[in-house]
Image (tube, coloured by chain):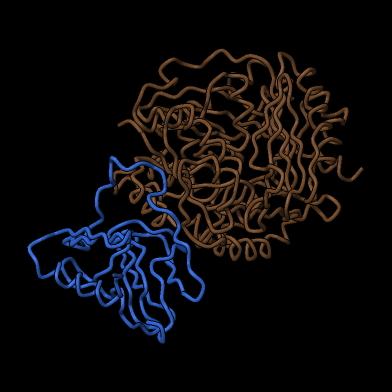
Chain colours: A brown, B blue
Amino acid sequence: MSIRRLLVANRGEIAARIIRTCRALGIETVLAVSEADRDSVPARLSSRVLCIGPARASDSYLRPETIVQAALGSGCQAIHPGYGFLSERAPLARLCEQHGVIFIGPTAETLEAVGDKLRARAEAEAAGVPVVPGGSADSAAAARTLARSIGVPLLVKAVGGGGGRGMKRVEREADLDAALELAAAEAGAAFGDARLYLERVVAPARHVEVQVLGDGAGHVIQLGERDCSVQRRYQKLIEETPAPGLAPALRARLHEAAVRFAARLRYRGAGTVEFLVAADRGEFWFLEMNARIQVEHPVTEQTSGIDIVAEQIAIAAGESSCVARGTPVLAGCAIECRINAEDPARDFAPSPGIVSEVVWPSGAGIRVDTHIEPGSRVPPFYDSLLAKIIAFAPERATALERLRAALAATRIVGVATNLAFQSRVVADPRFAAGGVDLGFLAAVTHG
Amino acid sequence: MSLTAQDIAEITRLLEESAFAELELEVNGLKIHLRRDGAAPATPRPPPSTATAEAPRAVPVIEPGLTPVRAPLLGTFYRAPKPGAPPFVDVGTRVEPETVIGIIEVMKLMNTVRAGAPGVVRAIHARDGELVEYGEALMVLAPRESG
């Protein structure tokens, strides 16, 4: 079924990004906005805008019935959920399946399989992919026994969570009970699922993830990996591809493991398999799968030459996609910096407001994905991502040089941002050398 | 000659009693298009395949002194409780804050919409069986004295 009109069920830069590809493909877009986003840049770019509810996401962007009703009522054949919000919630995918609307993503069944982090771990093991030592913590007694066998430090994680949300680090066995209690309460409130599991802390380690595309019939290709080890409190700040300094054999094993995992699920659409990697030991462990487009997808687009949004649409519509052509030749290096409306001087507190003035960089090897222009409002209700500045070049040193110049050329007035902080991070000699681990950013912040 | 709310109510009644499904009337540049629609279908209609993605109608300007009744949620708007039934309200109907003025359906779930303020229905902007946005002015109320 060909898609002539598509509902974009998201906001911010990813909404603008999806609309851009739709325009190139000649697909009309209907953008579902909350009241706070009526005058946003993506609202202006979209063929049509429908207001779906008040600013609060739980009354607008998080309502599957309203989203599907908006699609049906405006004659859309498909819904693109972007990332976050409803993108990985099985109820939206299922509602689409029931009402003959194409959900641009995996099946509801797959979303359930990878959304339950314990099930995802079991799937990984069944696919012969190593997982971090750990397991279910369904009672305090079971958790204590497990904790003793895997050892501290360990992480208490939410089965229904992911992306580092609702995670507790336990340094001493004596602190386990309290952490479990707190984590269960938080997970119950945030995800409607209080179940927990434990994982050993693997350190030092890097976060390396593999971009995959599947056709839903068991064919899966990978588009290379991304190193996302520059994180602050489990939130990614800088991502790059290829991961610097990985031995070719380890890289190949990561790619194979990701493809094996996704193929076992007969994965449909774009997804990312995340791993912890101990590069010096040549070891890696499955973390989780993100069953949607990632914030950091542009670096992969720059090195693969593939428009991931266009491929998502083609796969969802059952049209021919690049999956049939196999893994493309990957060339060059790309690095992305996330620019957030966060104030480093106030412990990175969100800094909503009006952007009175903004200058984005341009030039050879520079791409900016943003939803911000002079006068744009940054509402306090949503995440604080303003833009992604991506630099690419045939080799890493040039990409890094371009990124530094691009950050220096960027100017944002009106809201506090992490721009200067990011400049400092990319200027750090350890980052320039490449291959930093997950402890790197804390080291930069504290000295 | 101009049309009063009462005239329109009368014309609507005549149409309903007639064998015709539609009536178009132009009086001194004022155009009225009435359609008897087998009204509120029980299931959502298939998406209109020929419609464009452009917004189908301009946002009505609310005259000073008039109170809009806004859609409390996005969904399919129905003017009557069931197909063929008379509409909840018409132009000229006196309403109280609690008066039901229509239904908004979201995935088979029927939500009643109330006037929210006292007044007299001056104009109805939302079309029966069509998608309305959150916050859209479904109809406008005039103060009672002038109704």
The quarter of the displayed image where residue A444 is located: top right
Q: Quadrant of the image for the C terminus of chain A? A: top right
Q: Is residue B125 above or below residue A80?
A: below
- The x, y position of residue A142, in whole percent, is 56, 58
Q: Is residue B121 above or below residue A272?
A: below
Q: Residue at x 38, y 33 (%)?
A: A316
Q: Choose between B122 and A22: the one closer to the eye.
A: B122
Q: Residue at x 31, y 57 (%)?
A: B130
Looking at the image, how many numbered discs can be counted on the residues? 0
Residue B1 appears left or right of A138 = left
Q: Quadrant of the image for the N terminus of chain A? A: top left
Residue A87 appears left or right of A349 = left
- The x, y position of residue A333, in whole percent, is 69, 19
In this view, the residue farthest toward the right is A447
Do we see residue A94 in this rendering?
Answer: no
The quarter of the displayed image where residue A180 is located: bottom right
Q: Is residue A214 above or below residue B59?
A: above
Q: Residue at x 20, y 63 (%)?
A: B39
Q: Choose between B89 and B76: the one closer to the eye.
A: B89
The quarter of the displayed image where residue B96 is located: bottom left
- The x, y position of residue A257, in whole percent, is 53, 26
Do we see residue B128 in this rendering?
Answer: yes
